[in-house]
Amino acid sequence: MCRLFGLIANKEVDVKFSMFEAENNFKSKAKGNPDGWGVGWYENAEAKVEKYPESAFLSSKFDEVVKELKSKIIVAHVRLASNGRPAVKENSHPFVYKNWIFAHNGTINKQRIKELLNAPYNLNFTSEPIDSEVYFRYILQCVEEESDFFKGLKKALLEVTKDDDGANFVMSDGKKLYAFCWKYSLWYLERNPQLPFHAKSKQTLALIESKRLAKEKAVLVASEKVTTDENWLQLQDGEFLKVNESLEVTRINLI
């Protein structure tokens, strides 16, 4: 099963702790998800993605990219192929369309949803296409058709989840971070080092103190809790998470 990670912060931050140092760090999830990895972020408000058809756990390139990366919004993914060819760069996540970044965990009915796509959303796929990119395009098509983000999103999700397949995602438009939970675990954390905090591990204590000194705040989303001594909250099936530029969190039941 693929793994997702997303972050939105009040300033440009790095994710070295979450990727490498935390007790349940994201890189360790690549052991069971060897078919590709990718990281998406925004640079001068423009979506950027690096992705490779190899295990992040064994990849020196993964280490290199993550150690150099700083952004207000970051989306990461490690892939276990359930649709399309394994270990090809084109099928690795995240995907980009216009200025959106999207990563998916699960499997949806690709053929049925693909038949619902119209131009330009059914053109110029960057993958085979696999189900995840079809899912991404369908969400954006519905949003455009409804001329309202939440109406379009709900329309897309009601259609996709008819098949009862895994539909977790993390996505961003460069300003906000969004996540949806369906059939697989998804957690989020509001990290505000300015508030009282009681950590057990020395690693987390050191992280929080460095974030406090730098006046950094962030909201993180992940398939599993990255740390064991912070207040992670679990999203329920059908629940959608929106985090705006002020790091205000909104949870909405859409299914």
Image (spheres, rainbow, N blue to C red):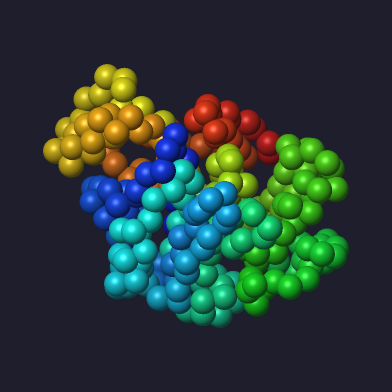
Q: Tell whether 63 sits left or right of 70.
A: left
Quarter placement of the C terminus = top right
The residue shown at (72%, 59%) is: 137
The x and y percentages for residue 198 are 22, 25
* Extreme-front residue of the structure: 44
Q: Please indicate whether residue 139 sits to the left or right of residue 236 in the image.
A: right
Please indicate whether residue 146 sits to the left or right of residue 45 in the image: right
Q: Quadrant of residue 32?
A: bottom left
Whether 199 is drawn above or below 155: the answer is above
Give whichever of 238, 208 is nearer the camera: 208
Q: Is residue 121 visible?
A: yes
- Residue at 18% x, 42% y: name it: 203
Q: Position of residue 19 (x, y in %)?
A: 32, 54
Q: Nearer the viewer, residue 158 or 163?
A: 158
Q: Is residue 135 visible?
A: no
Residue 98 on image: x %, y %: 68, 58
Toward the left, the furthest residue is 202
Q: Residue at x 40, y 67 (%)?
A: 33
Viewer-side residue, 71 vs 185: 71
Q: Residue at x 23, y 48 (%)?
A: 23
In front: 115, or 41? 41
Q: How many badges with numbers are in the image?
A: 0
Residue furthest top as drawn: 196
Provide residue 74's location: percent of width, then percent of height: 46, 50
